[in-house]
Every structure is written in C-alpha cells, then in structure tokens.
Amino acid sequence: MSTTQAPGVELTRRPEGRQGEVLTADALAFVADLERRFGLRRRELLQRRRERRARFAAGELLDFLPETREIRDGDWTVAAPPEAYADRRVEITGPVDRKMIINALNSGARGFMADFEDSLSPTWTNVVEGHVNLTDAIEGTIEFTGPDGREYRLGEQTATLLVRPRGWHLQDKHVIVDGRAVTGAFLDFGLYAYRNARRLVAKGSGPYFYLPKMESHLEARLWNDVFTHTEATLGLDRGTIRATVLIETLPAAFEMDEILYELREHAAGLNAGRWDYMFSAIKTFRERPEFVLPDRNDVKMTVPFMRAYTELLVRTCHARGTHAMGGMAALIPSRKDPDANKRATEAVAGDKRREAGDGFDGTWVAHPDVVEVAMAEFDEVLGDRRNQIDRRRDDVQVAASDLLDVAATPGGHTEAGLRNDVNVGIQYISAWLRGNGAAGIYGLMEDAATAEIARSQVWQWLRHGVELDDGTPVTPELVRRREDEELERIRGEIGDDEWFEREGRPRESRELFEQVALSGEEFVEFLTIPAYEHLD
C-alpha cells in the first residue's frame, strides 16, 4: 500500500514512469472529494436496483412510471447540441491504448468514444496510462511505434473525443479512499475532467462523456449532480460538461424521458446500446420463461422488442431536441478474405441504412475499415444537414407490452448457438484476463457486453430446461462437454500449445465462465466483477 499526499487516499500500487503525471495529489484529492460527496448515494442506488429486482423475481413487470407522467407529457427540451459537435453521424469506439486512440482519431469518424468500460480490461496499467494517452491526444503529441517499427501519429483532421467511464456497479481496488475502494466511475471521470476539462474548452471542444449501464432516472440525477459540482469546482460554465446516455438496460428504456430531464442542461442525447440491452432482457426477468431468447445471433435489431426500443429512443430524443445515436456495428472486415469482407461491409451498410432511415442522427462502429461504409449511409440521408433532430417521429407509439415482447423473437436454440456461446465466452474471458477488453473473435469485435450475452444465455437455457432444436436437453453436463470440445478447437486454431497454456489461461478462463454461466439458481450480476479479482 502506497500513501499519497492526498489525505485519506492510498494506492495499492506505486506509480511508475508517467503514471505519476496522472496520480498527483490534487487530482487524487478531487477524486476523493467525489467519492466522499456522492459515494453513499451510489451505494443506495445500487441497493435500490437489488430491491427492484426482487420485485421482478416476485412477479412484477416493468411499466412507465406513474409518478413521472408529467415529465413524459411535458413540453420541454434539453440544452441545444454543442456547436462544435452538432454533426455526429459516425462515431468509433475502443479502449484507451495509444495505437487505438491514434487510429480512431484518424479514422474519419466524427467522434471517438475512448472507453474505460466494456472494451477495457481495467488493469492498473490500462487505466492509469489510458489517462496519459488521452491527455497526449488532446495536446496533439501522442505517438506510438509498433513492434514492427511502424510509427503512428495524429493527422491534421481528427475526431472529437468522448470518454466513457465505468458503470455505477464497478469499483477500482487500486485506489482506496478512507479505507474503501473508490468508485470506478469517479476515478475515470474525475481524473479525466480534472486533468483535461479546461484544456478541452480552451481548444474549442469540451469534456464530453458517454454514461453506461444506468437503470433509472435517479441514477442520471446523481451524474447530473456530479457534473454540476465539477463545473463549480473547476470554474467551468454551467452546462460545459455534456453526456450521452447509453440506453442499454431494459429498465432504462421505460425512463428515457426522465433520464434526459434529469440531465437536461448536460444532455447530449441517447444511444441504443444494443448488446447490453439484450443481456439486460435476459437478466431482468430471468425467472420468466417468456423472456428466453433464441441464439444470440438470431436477435436482430428488427425483432419486435428491439425495434420498439429503438423507435421509442428516436422519438424521445427528437421530441426533446437532442441526438439519437444508433448501435454498434461489431463486424470486423477481413483483409485476407474478399468474400468475407464483402459480406461484412454489406451487413454494416444494411444496418446503418436502416438506422439513418429510422431517424437516427449517428451511429457506432468498432473498426476503422467500416467508418466509410457507415458514413455513406448517413450521408445519403443527411446530405449537408448536421443531423435530423428536427425529424419528429410522432408516428411512433410504443406501449410497455411492446418493449417486453421478447416472446415474439423468432429463431431457434441450436447446437451451433450453444457452441458459439461457450467458445466466445471462454475466449473473451481469456483475452480480458490478459488485459485485452476488445477481442476480435470469428469476425466480430467482442467486448464485455457481448460476452455477457453469451454466458447469460447459457445460464438462461439451463434455468428453463431448454431443448436444442434437435431435441437435446441443455444440461450442465452438456455444457461442460462442449467446453472440452471448444477449448480443443481453440487450441488447434492457435497452434501453439505452450502459449495456449501459459498466456491463454484456459483453466482459469473456463472456471470463470462456469462461475457465471453454471451458477444454478443464483445469477451473477456482471461477469467482470468476479473476473476483476483475477487482475493485477
């Protein structure tokens, strides 16, 4: 344990090299102040989640809140989009390593969401040096030389920088405030805002954020209070901080208006966080058989419950004068297989064509090679306009039953789907334990959200006694046999037994997968919580 000059703050690791630039006494004191002011409220809100979940387990269903009807029916708007970032037609996302930051900022996308959450494995080095990298990027000094000698540096035109801190449910064990592990969100947000907010404003931009995993407008209210306090402390004008909220939990879909209302002076829009939303649909009503999903690859954005959610998101955002951002294109083009590359780019184009046609103002991609593909679809709809916020979707009428109509999702429960869940779940956990939170697996960019779908689907199929389409019942024994077979498949694909055993950590990865997928009646809320105990 390393003491610091910030009273009440200790570090479990001693800063090395440039890490000391980030972990200064004044920056840590600012983070500690956030924890002391707002940490109890965060814990109370997490308890409120648990109490609500208990009511769902007892049979209660979600519905729009009667106590906030006046907000939903009210005639109000959020703050106008920042002039410097009114055009968001394509954003790229990824973790905060130096090469990724440079490539993303140079990709031609309008924005780059630098991620401390689902695509980052939160090792001490990844988190702290991520902040070094972001400040270098803002200053335009970031450079990187790869193992092959190739050099990377910023071009003249770069994307607008946005940052996603961790969700409310995560802590960071490396920073201890008054004897308690600091809230991950306060560490990520606090270090970035303290170090960079004023320099961003001076450069004509601002501290822009994405907020993940929220389940209620009360959680958005907490973020708004954090923003207001930060602006006052740092001498920023009220409303300088802007945030786009990922609507990626089923409960949040019923509170979109209320979330925007709470953040109205800081709101920058809502995003359709499609992968976590599918995971949340499984998790929220895990006791109910009508919420059993088919193979994860069969759950397209056009199925009824996903379609209702995205249509409502666009209507809500445009009624309130703010951006509606589409979901992630996780496909990775192949530079070796022309046919696979064509299929991937055509799939991305079709997905983005649908979003632009539905009224979204922008979208997400995970790989620089598909930025141009996505951009073309939004250019076709937007033309010279910076967005289509003025396109009201008053034709959209979505009821609670539409958002909950998971049972209408077509698709099967197949052997291939089970194998994919097992294989991807274990492979992703292996990558995460090695410090890589964004892993290309079989042509898709997998992150914690997609891995959550894989493991929770296995749990759900076991919980409800699903039979595969060939009549085979899904049992723990079947899953374990598929684990044996898929691990051997992975070993063969890698072709290096020594690396597989040493770096791949197959036994540890499998044990963690089983901990979150074969846990019986108990459902582990997030796989990253037990997995975090295995990180340095």
Image (cartoon, helix red, strand yellow):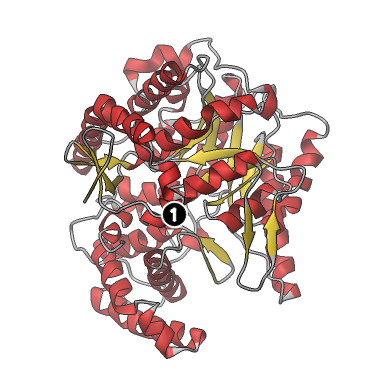
Name which quarter of the figure residue 422 lies in: bottom left
In the rendered view, would you say 474 is above or below 106?
below
Please tell me which residue lies in front, 436 or 202: 202
* Position of residue 410 measured from the top left corner of the image (x, y, whole percent): 49, 57
At x 42%, y 63%, the residue is: 435
Q: Secondary structure at mark 1?
A: loop
- Which residue is at a point 76% across and 42% down the rendered structure image? 157
- Residue 278 visible in the picture: no
Q: Is 512 rendered above or below residue 217? A: below
- The three-letter amino acid code for the residue at tag 1 is Gly
The answer to which of 112 and 247 lies nearer the viewer is 112
- The quarter of the image holding the C terminus is bottom left
Q: Is residue 32 shown left or right of residue 437?
A: left
Whether residue 243 is visible, yes or no, is yes
Q: Residues within 10 Å of mark 1 (few under 14, many from 20)?
A: few
Rendered residue at 53%/10% (across/down): 75
